Image (cartoon, rainbow, N blue to C red):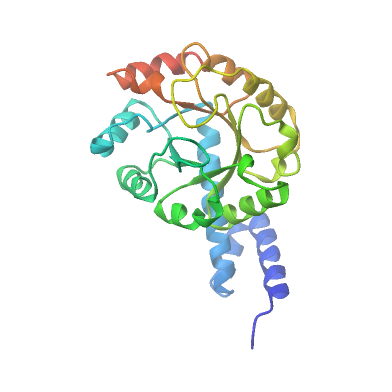
């Protein structure tokens, strides 16, 4: 007897309700239910675990591996983790959406083998929907896509839903010129909102303070439960303002990687946000 999509959707919704009310019962029920529902619950559990882990760490510094020595990536990540990192930020650039080109799934896989910390993968690329599954399978715990590559908010909402079904936290990124109205219909449904404080593509740019206004607005919205992240020009001069504006996750690149002593840089930055 075939399974129709309507009954499967109803079953999925029913199990989510059970999961919220009594997780032990729902977990037991999973073993008797459809494989699709088991996958749904596994994805839900992973998202919830990662989001809780990041919330408990907040405000947290997310070191970007953009300027790391990829020939020694495992050691670089180990050094960052030893210095105090509680997640890693990976910038994937395709050379089309942004002028620069970085890396793909292979580096994400290598990072996953090197650490059990959450991997925050920022997809600065056109047509991200084509690669979401591959990046998730490579080890991404957070997948963030740009509003600017979507035709409308419905396409953005579809990407968010797909990422969440894969078991990753779904993030939305907006560039400095992009107003919050562009994500107004989706902001309440995603897990993370990344406010870029530079135009994406290259490191070392000057911090754009319009990101602070966006962070404050999102932080004050009662319907938004997303983690708030800021990326670009975050350093000793700007990190405190970002945390005060409501940022939970602060992506830091050259302010850490330009120094030889990662632990010392971490301590200096963390003293400004605690």
Residue found farthest to the bottom: 1
Residue 178 coordinates in the image, percent (x, y):
67, 31
Residue 245 in percent (x, y) is at: 64, 20
Considering only vertical position in the picture, is 214 above or below 159? above
Residue 128 rendering spot, x and y as whole percentages = 54, 50
Point out residue 116 in the picture as x, y percentages from the top left corner: 37, 44
In the rendered structure, the answer to whether residue 87 lies left or right of residue 72 reads: right
Q: Residue 71's image quarter?
A: top left
Q: Of 12 and 186, which appears nearest the observer?
A: 186
Q: Is residue 199 above or below residue 128?
A: above
Residue 69 image-quadrant placement: top left
Q: Is residue 13 visible?
A: yes
- Residue 245 or residue 123, whichever sits in front: 123
Residue plotted at (61% across, 44% down): 149
Q: Position of 177 compared to 127: left or right? A: right
**Residue 250 to residue 22: above or below:** above
Residue that appears at 70% across and 65% down: 14
What residue do we see at 39% from left, 50% from top?
Answer: 105
- For the residue pair 28 and 188, the one nearer the viewer reads as 188
Asked if one can make out residue 266 in the rendered structure from this viewpoint, the answer is no
């Amino acid at each position: 007897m075939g399974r129709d999509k309507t009954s499967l959707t109803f079953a999925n919704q029913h199990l989510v309700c059970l999961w919220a009310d009594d997780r032990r019962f729902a977990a037991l029920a999973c073993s008797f239910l459809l494989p699709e529902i088991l996958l749904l619950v596994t994805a839900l559990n992973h998202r919830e675990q990662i989001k809780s882990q990041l919330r408990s760490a907040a405000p947290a510094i997310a070191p970007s591996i953009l300027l790391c020595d990829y020939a020694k990536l495992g050691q670089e990540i180990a050094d960052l983790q030893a210095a105090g990192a509680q997640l890693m930020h990976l910038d994937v650039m395709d050379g089309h959406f942004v002028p620069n080109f970085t890396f793909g799934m292979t580096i994400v896989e290598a990072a996953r083998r090197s650490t059990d910390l959450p991997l925050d993968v920022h997809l600065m690329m056109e047509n991200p929907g084509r690669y979401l599954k591959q990046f998730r399978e490579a080890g991404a715990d957070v997948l963030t896509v740009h509003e600017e590559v979507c035709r409308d908010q419905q396409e953005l909402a579809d990407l968010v839903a797909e990422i969440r079904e894969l078991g990753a936290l779904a993030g939305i990124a907006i560039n400095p010129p992009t107003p919050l109205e562009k994500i107004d219909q989706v902001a309440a449904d995603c897990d993370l909102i990344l406010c870029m404080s530079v135009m994406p593509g290259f490191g070392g740019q000057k911090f754009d303070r319009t990101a602070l206004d966006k962070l404050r607005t999102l932080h004050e919205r009662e319907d938004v439960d997303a983690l708030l992240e800021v990326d670009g020009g975050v350093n000793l001069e700007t990190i405190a303002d970002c945390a005060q504006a409501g940022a939970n996750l602060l992506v830091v690149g050259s302010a850490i990687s330009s120094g030889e002593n990662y632990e010392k840089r971490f301590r200096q930055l963390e003293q400004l946000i605690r």
